[in-house]
Image (cartoon, rainbow, N blue to C red):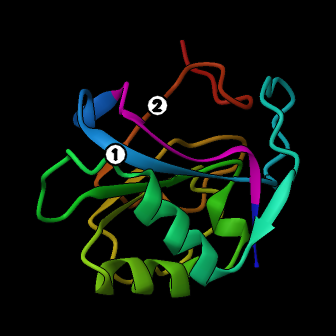
């Protein structure tokens, strides 16, 4: 079972970084073990879905008029790597999706099958490996002059 935040699964246009303007399905997971002092986002669990039901919901949220061979699914949170997302990544990849992950980099986790990995370092940094690294001033205590 996957813990999801209130917004859960939704179709939108990516609003930042390399994939700016790219239509994609977002999966917003609940929970975050990072514990940033200034976090202004409520990632409390509001519902859970099995892998099968989550993939079905992803399938349904993509507009039928959106004709693309391999749509994007962006896994975000909270902290998605706090949950066992490898089976989900594998299933989505096998189903023809390109899978992107947004994470804090607070833990090193090997994940197979990702098409894109976005790391936004927060309080402690264990992993700076990704397709992109977003350095956001004052995010979770990460500062520079």
Instruction: Judge whether 96 appears above or below 36 on screen.
Output: below
**For the magenta stretch, what is the residue range?**
4-16
Residue at horizontal 45 percent and vertical 78 percent from the top: 89
Q: Seen from this angle, which residue lies furthest top?
A: 145
Task: Report the side of 139 relative to 11 (left or right).
Answer: right
Q: Quick one: label 1, few (<14), some, or many (20+) residues within 10 Å?
A: many
Task: Report the side of 142 relative to 23 (left or right).
Answer: right
Quarter of image, res 92: bottom left
- First reached walking from the N terminus: tag 1 or tag 2: 1
* Residue 98 x/y as whole percent: 27, 65
- Tag 2's secondary structure? loop
Q: Is residue 8 magenta?
A: yes
Q: Is residue 9 magenta?
A: yes
Residue at horizontal 70 percent and vertical 49 percent from the top: 124
Quarter of image, res 48: bottom right
**Taken as a whole, is the magenta stretch helix, strand or loop?**
strand
Q: Quick one: label 2, few (<14), some, or many (20+) residues within 10 Å?
A: some
* Residue 129 x/y as whole percent: 39, 61
Image quarter in which the C terminus is found: top right
CA separation in Å, label 1 and label 2: 23 Å
Residue at horizontal 31 percent and vertical 81 percent from the top: 95
Task: Report the side of 89 relative to 36 (left or right).
Answer: left
Image quarter in which the N terminus is found: bottom right
Front residue of this view, candidates 112 and 3: 3
Residue 24: image tag: 1
Q: Which residue is mark 2?
A: 135
* Residue 88 x/y as whole percent: 52, 80
Query: Which dot, 1 or 2, sits closer to the camera?
Result: 1
* Residue 37 x/y as whole percent: 87, 29
């Amino acid at each position: 079972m996957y813990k999801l935040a209130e917004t859960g699964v939704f179709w939108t246009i990516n609003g930042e970084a390399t994939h700016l303007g790219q239509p994609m399905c977002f999966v917003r997971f609940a929970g975050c073990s990072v514990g940033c002092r200034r976090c202004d986002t409520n990632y409390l669990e509001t519902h859970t879905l099995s892998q099968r039901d989550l993939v079905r919901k992803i399938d349904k949220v993509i507009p039928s008029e959106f004709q693309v061979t391999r749509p994007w699914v962006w896994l975000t949170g909270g902290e998605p790597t706090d949950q066992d997302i490898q089976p989900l990544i594998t299933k989505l990849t096998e189903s023809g999706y390109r899978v992107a992950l947004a994470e804090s980099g607070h833990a090193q986790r090997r994940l197979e099958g990702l098409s894109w990995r976005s790391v936004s370092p927060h309080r402690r940094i264990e992993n700076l490996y990704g397709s992109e690294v977003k350095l956001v001033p004052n995010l979770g205590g990460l500062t520079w002059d």
